[in-house]
Image (cartoon, rainbow, N blue to C red):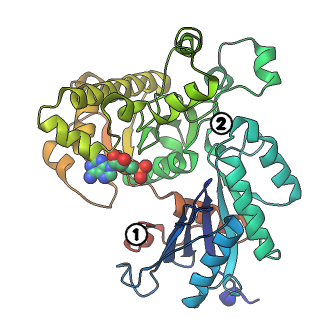
Amino acid sequence: MTESSRPTRVLVLNSGSSSVKYQLLDMADSSRLAVGLVERIGEKTSRLVHTPLAGGPDGAGKRERTGPIADHTAALRAVADELARDGLGLDSPELAAIGHRVVHGGLKFSEPTVVDDAVCAEIERLVPVAPLHNPANLTGIRTARELRPDLPQVAVFDTAFHTTMPEHAARYAIDIETADAHRIRRYGFHGTSHAYVSRKTAELLGKDPADVNVIVLHLGNGASASAVAGGRCVDTSMGLTPLEGLVMGTRSGDIDPAVTFHLERVAGMSTDEIDELLNKKSGLVGLCGDNDMREIRRRVDEGDPRAALAFDIYIHRLRKYIGAYTAVLGRVDAVAFTAGVGENAAAVREAAVAGLEALGLAVDAERNAVRSDEPRIVSPDSAGTVVAVVPTDEELEIAAQTFALVGGDRSGGEDRARAGRADDA
Ligand code: AMP
């Protein structure tokens, strides 16, 4: 193929246990051509929502269908059919590669990797440390390879950005032989987002990422903080699994491990019940019954004491991590808020840095109240450290890394892509 007719499209797949989210991007200008979601795979009420965006970012042509979709193979076939209806089928010569989000890459995968049988086997070997995520990711990869065996498939790992963590940050202080025998260490997650946001924050500051120290606060339903020194992650709040660290929508975050022994010995709970308690029934939902920050803020404003306590616990933990990562980094150039809560909840940003002027941190009330999809500074010009809101874009980052690996150029027009961003459901 000539340079001008080289394929530039990348399909990004995020396969969960009962869902597949997807986006088709054209890396010639980083525009989105289609986004969609299949959910409740394996149930009678499976649902596919597909939005073609080639005609514009408004999602006017959104299509939805419900009915049984038996498994991931059927789901991907349904996605391929929808894309084909828009002239964007998987058999298109313009498709350069498929990029897969893979949650756990262990220590082995520090870079995006072209998938072959050996890579699939290694992702499978990591299932014991990511039992909820890696099997679904792998099913998505295998299905996509069946559908397009000739096309490069690239795995982009959530853990990859954190593999630069020094041993003293990555290791737990437990018996070292036991830890190594069972690959117990802190891996960290949301790495694609932390990488993207830390780089974008440097751009916002007009600096080279190598010259900037950033604390990234990825606050979505899952939440994690990272300390990024000169473009390299030196610490992050999630650990062996995404349970450690900040208070999240349904996860407890940091907890004394002896709580689990207590629940087993005194409360008579099984390991599975404790797992469920800490991962699904804790965090904000455990504390006040809601995990949506909008609802919690509404309740706080109405004077609801349980919502206020949940909010205070959430903020207290967040502030502890800001303080800890300030100490880890020594010099902090910026604190960047991202993901659903970080990008939208001005009250969380304000509370997270309130009274931290001694650390150079403050928000300007007017700037903090602005709603926008663009990266922006919300601290006053006088503050020693920049506080920024930097919208994350994991799909674009996965597509860019995938495209770069299969011989494309990743520099094409990330910013223009934002104009075409749309929710995938
Ligand atoms: P994510 O996991 O990044 O999609 O973030 C999802 C979370 O973002 C939801 O659970 C909400 O709590 C939160 N969120 C979304 N929009 C807003 C908003 N306008 N204000 C406060 N929180 C929001």
The relative height of residue 228 versus residue 207 in the rendered view (above or below) is above
Residue sitting at 71 percent across and 69 percent down? 73
On the image, the x and y values in percent for residue 202 come to 44, 49
Residue 112 is at least partly visible in this image: no
Q: Which of 267/288 is in front?
A: 267
For the C terminus, give its image quadrant. Answer: bottom left
Near-viewer residue (312 or 283): 283
Identify the residue at image location x=72%, y=25%: 184
Q: Which residue was labeled with disc 2?
A: 164
Q: Is residue 236 left or right of residue 4?
A: left
In the drawing, does residue 411 fall left or right of residue 327? right
Q: Residues within 10 Å of mark 1 (few under 14, many from 20)?
A: some
Q: Is residue 195 above or below residue 322?
A: below
Q: Is residue 146 above or below residue 40?
A: below
Q: Examine the image and state in which quarter residue 291 appears.
A: top left
Residue at the disc numbered 1: 422
Q: Quadrant of residue 147?
A: bottom right
Q: Mark 2: give few (<14), some (14-19) or many (20+) Cα within 10 Å.
A: some
| Image quarter of residue 318 | top left
The residue under the point 58% across, 83% down is: 83
Q: Amino acid at mark 1?
A: Ala
Element under disc 2: helix
Compare marks 1 and 2 and give the one earlier in the sequence: 2
**Residue 221: percent from left, percent from top:** 42, 44
Q: Secondary structure at mark 1?
A: loop
> How many discs mark residues in the rendered view?
2
Q: Amino acid at mark 2?
A: Thr
Between marks 1 and 2, how big is the CA–CA gap? 32 Å
